[in-house]
Image (spheres, rainbow, N blue to C red):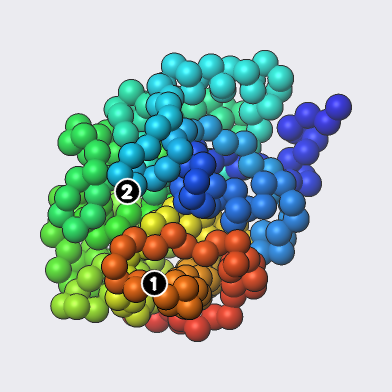
Amino acid sequence: MLFQSELASHFRLTISRENHIFRKKVGKLAKLEKFGNGSSDPFLGSALRDWSSSEYSISYSPGYPTFKGQVLNGQQLWELIEGLQENDLLYYTHLLTGYIGSVSFLSTVLEVVNKLRSVNPKLKYVCDPVMGDEGKLYVPPELVSVYREKVVPVASMLTPNQFEAELLTNLRIESEKDGREACNILHAAGPPMVVLTSININGNLFLIGSHQKEKGLSPEQFKIVIPKIPAYFTGTGDLTTALLLGWSNKYPDNLDKAAELAVSSLQALLQRTINDYKSAGHDPKSSSLEIRLIQSQNDIRNPEIKFRAERYT
């Protein structure tokens, strides 16, 4: 039997701590589809093994009128980690987290980070600090300080939206300059890679990325202008972070290139989603659209770069 230390040279081993939603390809399932769950994926350059745990295992997204399922607590998550440890299965290269709904569960995730780094000190922790959007919190208010004070310092990459970046930095983002400063504040707190995945400035939509390659050095910063699409989609945040993890793994010193590929994949997928809904006679503006992951696999694996990064000087 091969153990994790022997597998490490052959695989990228990722834990994705996301939600199981059985009727929709979002959340954890979006990441499994993205990574291939053990199959070879050309954009990673090697096979990637994915172990998953979920805070929520539910039948439908909460956007539906009803949904059923279970909520995993922190103790149950830790029991899964103990099971992995007993089988010498704690060597991972990446940990990815998204929506977390309680302080207790998030606190256990922090314990997981420490445990995994005791086995592999180079483990990269990619955190999408899902807390809210457009001025509205999705999570209990007490989670904000836990993210700011405990999660940000241990993250390797952080992917907040505009509202979440404001919560984490206590800075109102009203310009590109503010967005860059928010990245600097977050770098000072911990993560060398920061991607503000969506910033709306005077009706214009941007992604702002920042990579501080060494502490004390000025970060390399860039923006990507993103077209506005008149529709609402489910699962785009999860997929964006998954794409950024995958492409930054292949291009660890070129966050701007990783972001170009991620944005180009996502935009192609969203356009396909709209076209499919229109072909079926559905008005894309009438409700939330479920993104067309399966139909867009080639756009995910081999995107045509149509959205270019502009370096700040």
Quadrant of res 296: bottom right
Q: Position of residue 56 (x, y in %)?
A: 42, 33
| Residue located 13% across and 59% down the image | 172
Could you tell me how far apart the alpha carbons at marks 2 and 1 are, in whole angstroms? 18 Å
**Other residues around mark 1 within 10 Å, as few (<14) / some (14–19) / many (≥20):** few
Please determine whether, in this image, residue 298 is positioned above or below residue 213: below
Q: Horizontally, is 10 left or right of 154 in the view?
A: right
**Other residues around mark 2 within 10 Å, as few (<14) / some (14–19) / many (≥20):** few
| Residue located 41% across and 21% down the image | 74
Q: Position of residue 98 (x, y in %)?
A: 41, 44
| Residue located 24% across and 49% down the image | 132
Q: Amino acid at mark 1?
A: His
Q: Amino acid at mark 2?
A: Gly
Q: Is residue 267 visible?
A: no
| Residue located 46% across and 47% down the image | 27
Q: Identify the residue under disc 1.
A: 282
Label located before the other in sequence (2 or 1): 2
Q: Quadrant of the N terminus?
A: top right
Q: Position of residue 290 (x, y in %)?
A: 44, 60
Q: Horizontally, is 82 left or right of 273 in the view?
A: right
Q: Position of residue 206 (x, y in %)?
A: 31, 73
Q: Horizontally, is 6 left or right of 99 in the view?
A: right
Q: Which of the pair 276/201 is nearer the observer?
A: 276
Quadrant of res 51: top right
Q: Is residue 94 visible?
A: yes
Q: Identify the residue under disc 2.
A: 63
Q: Which of the pair 297/38 is nearer the observer?
A: 297
Q: Secondary structure at mark 1?
A: loop
The numbered dot on residue 311 is none
Q: Secondary structure at mark 2?
A: loop
Q: Quadrant of the C terminus?
A: bottom left
